[in-house]
Image (cartoon, grey):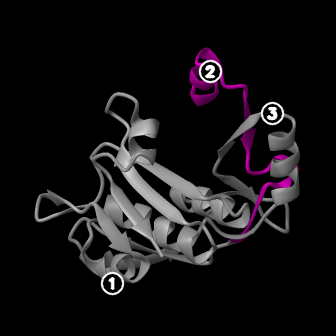
Amino acid sequence: MIVSMLQKNGINAVGLSGIDGKIIQAERKKKLIVMNEKGRKMVIDGGYTGKIREINTSLIQVILDQGYVPVISPIATSEESDFLNVDGDRAAAYVAGKMQSDKILFLTNVDGLLMDEKLVTKLSLDEAKAMLPKIGFGMEKKILAATEAIEMGVKQALVASGQRENPISRAIANDNCTVISK
């Protein structure tokens, strides 16, 4: 769907999964911590979830050099060639970080990080990391991924609403979104 939408807007995109050419390589998680229905943390088997270890930047660069925009789904491969599910926001962070991108954009259903129902428009890396324990579950993953991307060399992480008109250009212009930078 994303590739089709990009193509309709004149952007020559190609859809890939993280297993294609070992774009995303991960290690299988042994255990996961989840919340049960009573709000208590439980440890369960990691199943087919993974922690990202490596990104095949050379293949991504070849695709970019040929004029294509890669759209990569967050399925990784393990050393044993198992398919592993990895967090999409963190996969994007690793790709952006390893590719030394200037910016990474996380689109969501709200304008950005909301604290006390107010939009936080600017954060330093240290401020974002300090706020992590206070952030709700869905947004916590995006802010964590943003901090990881910046720690890997991305200059700016943006969290913005994908439900506004022209969401990408608005976010790049820092219009009504959260901007995290070093």
Q: Answer with left or right where residue 15 lies relative to residue 107.
A: right
Q: Is residue 88 left or right of residue 94?
A: left
User: Badge 1: few (under 14), some or many (20 or more) residues near its Cα, within 10 Å?
Assistant: few
Residue type (three-letter) at the residue carrying disc 3: Gly
The residue under label 1 is which amino acid type?
Answer: Ala
Tell me: 50 left or right of 60: left
User: Residue visible at 26% across and 66% down?
Assistant: 136
Question: Contact (CB < 8 A) between labels 2 and 3?
Answer: no
Determine which residue is flagged by label 1: 130
Q: Determine the residue positioned at 85% across, 42% down.
A: 65
Closer to the chain start, of discs 3 and 1, is 3
User: In the image, which is nearer the foreground, mark 2 or mark 3?
Assistant: 3
Residue furthest out toward the top = 8
Which residue matches tag 2? 4
Residue 7, magenta (yes or no): yes
Q: Are marks 3 and 1 in contact (CB under 8 Å)?
A: no
Residue mark closest to the camera, 3 vs 1: 3
Residue neighbourhood size for the residue with mark 3, other residues' Cα within 10 Å, grouped as few (<14), some (14–19), many (≥20)? few
The answer to whether residue 131 of the structure is visible from this angle is: yes
Q: Which mark is residue 58?
A: none
* Magenta-drawn segment: 1-27
Which residue is identified by label 3?
A: 67
Mark 2 residue crowding within 10 angstroms, few (<14) / some (14–19) / many (20+): few
- Residue 25 on image: x %, y %: 77, 64
Looking at this view, is 10 or 13 the one in front?
A: 10
Cα distance in 3D space between marks 3 and 1: 39 Å
* In this view, 35 is above or below 166: below
The disc labelled 2 sits on which kind of residue? Ser
Residue found at x 79% / y 54%: 23
- Asked which quadrant contains residue 135, the reply is bottom left
SS for callout 3 = loop
Does the image show residue 35? no
